Amino acid sequence: MSIDYAGGRFAPRAALIEAHRDAWSRIGAAGDWWNASARVAMVEEVRAAGACALCRERRAAISPNAVAGDHDTCSDLPSAAIDAVHRVVTDPGRLTRAWFDQIASSGLSAACYVELVSVVATTVVIDTTHRAMGLPLPLPPAVIDGPLGQQVEHDVVDDGAWLPLARRDDDMASATGLPAVPNIRRALSLVPSAPALFFRAFMPHYRLGGLDFAISQTQAEFVASRVSALNECFY
C-alpha cells in the first residue's frame, strides 16, 4: 500500500504527501549505521511495541525496571535495539541515563542509537497521521540494499546530554532568547542523515500548510504545548 492518504478524513496537501513518501523510501534504503533490512525491521518493531505484553506491564508499573522479561518481537534485530525501539515508542518519558548506558554497553553505539531514533520517530509520525485520518497503516517500505554511509558529525560537544550534540551558535539565537538550533535537532546531530530523515516527514505538519485548513502559529504552539504536556514530553 503506497502513501497517498486517499479516502482519509482530511485532505493533506501535495507537499505533505510527497514528504511522507520520500521519508518512507529513505527508511527502506541503507542508512549510515543500519542496513536497509534492519531499518525496515524497526518499522515492524514500532508496530509490534503497541501489542507487546512486556511493554504493557512496564507501562503500568511504578518503575519499568521493576518488570523483567522479553519483548514480543517480530524481527531478528539485536536485543538492545529491540528494547530501544519498544521503550522509545511506549514509555519515552521514563527513559534514564542508566538505561541508555546499559544498551550502549550491550553494543548499541551512539551513532546506531541516533539513527534508530530517527527511524522510529519518523515511523510514528507517518503511522499516527494514517490513524488520525482513519486509514490503515501503510505496508513497510520496500528494502533497497546498498552500502552503509558511515557518516558522523565530528564537530560535536559534550553539552550535558547522553549523546554528543552539535555546537550551539548563540550569536544566531532568535529574539526570544531560544537557541537557533533546537535541542530536538541537536539530539540527532551526531548522524547528519538522522535529522534529515525525521524533519523531512515532520516539518510539513508544523508549518501549518499540510492540510486544507490552517490554524494560526499561536494556536499551533498552544496545541503543541498541550500535547507535549499530556505525553509527558521530556523537552
Image (tube, rainbow, N blue to C red):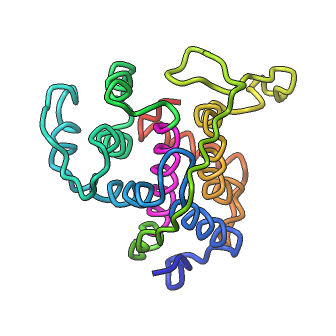
In the picture as drawn, the residue positioned furthest to the bottom comes out as 7
Q: Which image quarter: residue 167?
A: top right
**Against 151, is 144 above or below?**
below
Please give the range of residues in magenta: 112-130
Left or right: where 197 falls relative to 120: right
Residue 41 left/right relative to 201: left
Q: Quadrant of residue 170?
A: top right
What residue is drawn where x is 61% and y is 15%? 158
Say left or right for 43 vs 18. left
Return the x and y of residue 171 as percentages of the image width and height.
87, 21
Magenta stretch: dominant secondary structure: helix
Answer left or right for 94 relative to 54.
right
Q: Position of residue 224 (x, y in %)?
A: 57, 45
As rendered, which of 122 and 112 lies closer to the eye? 112
Q: Quadrant of the N terminus?
A: bottom left
The image shows residue 26, relative to residue 99, as above or below, that is: below
Residue drawn at (67%, 69%) of the image: 213
Residue shown at 19% from the left, 27% from the top: 62
- Please tell me which residue lies in front, 231 or 27: 27
Q: How many marks?
A: 0
Q: Foreground residue, 163 or 6?
A: 163
**Is residue 8 in the magenta section?**
no
Q: Nearer the viewer, residue 20 or 28?
A: 28
Identify the residue at horizontal 64%, vertical 32% (top origin). Answer: 186
> Residue 114: x and y, percent?
52, 38
Residue 81 position in % (x across, y down): 35, 42
162 relative to 85, above or below: above
Does the magenta-highlighted stretch encompass residue 115?
yes
The vertical placement of 92 against 147, above or below, is above
